Amino acid sequence: MFINRALESIVKEVSNTYPVLLVTGPRQIGKTTLLERVAEENRKYVSLDDPVARRLAKEEPLLFLQRYEPPIIIDEIQYAPELLPYIKLHVDKNKTNGDFWLTGSQMFQMMKDVSESLAGRVGILPMQGLSISELNKLPNEPYTTDTKRLLARSQVAKKMNLHEAYERIYKGSMPALFINEQSVERFYASYVDTYIHRDIRDLTQVADEMQFHRFLTACAARTSQMVNYAELAKDVGITSPTAKKWLSLLITSGIIVLVEPYFNNALKRIVKAPNMYFMDTGLCAYLTRWTSSESLEISAMSGAFFETFVVSEIIKSYLNAGKRAPLFYYRDSDQKEIDLIIEENGLLQPIEIKKSANPKNNSGRHFSILEKTGKVYGSGSIICMSDDLLPINKEVWAVPVWLI
């Protein structure tokens, strides 16, 4: 069974605009399947996971491009950065859009190499796992708090109750888990051992693999919290600079995302540390040792997982439209907080995230802080487990999680 991906039309658009297309993101999220699905019949394919192809690409890049002429898909380009200058030469000579489609799973050094070698010649599309829209076969739309858009979407979206929501949170967003029936726990155990540990070992200088696994687990236990490098370092037994470096590896590999605080000169006493979220709640649940959706749903971490799920889905709604998610959050020393702020075209859209099915009338009471910024702010969303899209007051609506 193939699940249509929202990025298919964006791939075609970028390929018609740039000589080189690069799709980035974690392992096993469907990057290669997406490109093969969209590719025309004459486009060749080669994976640099193959040691023979990798050796040729690294040692004889010119010969490699003679053997594998474009149009071509080159999988896992990070394993042979030596190819990039030769791709540049080919692009500058032939000037044909869409010649090279590249994928990259671990971007530690790769993005620097791509920026230096292919500046102005490459369109980059970050990709993540399956979204609610993709699983429910709905058109993808970048999330906004606009009530007219939400009302229209509520007519076609598939409803999801609390049990179904936590089954989805526990399962995560890896395509393999939806295409083939298999053990979720076994899949993520293999995923961590085979891909995350191997890629970290191959592409970075992490001396102690078990210590890195403990760090990964410590991050999972802190999903939806502010980043505190000193605490992370203390839990794992490493230095704060090492914790900062290792977290940057997880961010650049697409496993974790940081949501930065919203800054405005008119807002005082702002907490400046970013919030940290796992992009795949299934991986996060495996690392924190939850063995069922039911136990996760009633746990002390259920709210953190619900928030993580909402944030990741909103981010995916933007990525699947070929855009970067313009997300921020607000928290000050008086404990006033706005979980998410979307800033787009000069408009601020505040969002609060609650596991509750019946948000209180004072939900969103901190949204008015945004008046101090001098910017326009639109209607606010309380993304929650309500049965339907309902107004809480004139400016704030309760938005069911299945409407993201």
Image: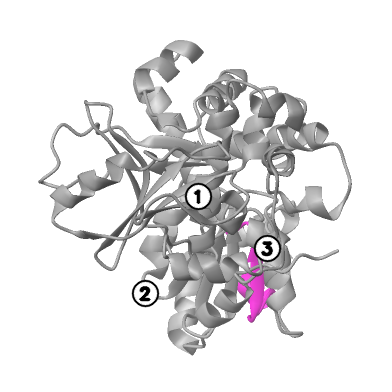
Q: Locate residue 24: give its quadrant.
A: bottom right
178 up-or-down from 279: above or below = below
Residue bearing mark 1 = 107
Q: Is residue 192 left or right of residue 142?
A: right
**Residue 370 left/right relative to 383:** left
Q: Rounded to the nearest whole Å, what is the CA distance between mark 3 and mark 2?
A: 31 Å
Q: Which residue is mark 3?
A: 134
Q: Tell me: residue 340, above or below residue 231.
A: below
Residue wearing tag 2:
120
Mark 1 and mark 3: span between their CA atoms?
Answer: 25 Å
N-term-proximal mark, 3 vs 2:
2
Callout 1 environment at 10 Å: few (<14), some (14 to 19), or many (20+)?
A: many
Residue 380, percent across and down? Answer: 37, 53
Residue pictured at 69% horizontal, 22% vertical: 289
Left/right placement of residue 235 relative to residue 59 reads: left
Left or right of 260 in this view: 188: right
Magenta highlight on residue 67:
yes
The amino acid type of the residue labelled 2 equals Gly
Query: Residue 341: image x %, image y %?
Result: 34, 50
Q: Residue at x 62, y 61 (%)?
A: 57
Residue 36, image x and y in percent?
Answer: 73, 72
Snapshot quadrant of residue 10: bottom right
* Badge count: 3
In the rendered image, the quadrant that contains the C terminus is bottom right
Check disc 3 and report its element: helix, strand or loop. Answer: helix
Please name which of the two marks, 1 or 3, marks the residue nearer to the observer.
3
Q: Indicate the amino acid at tag 3.
A: Glu
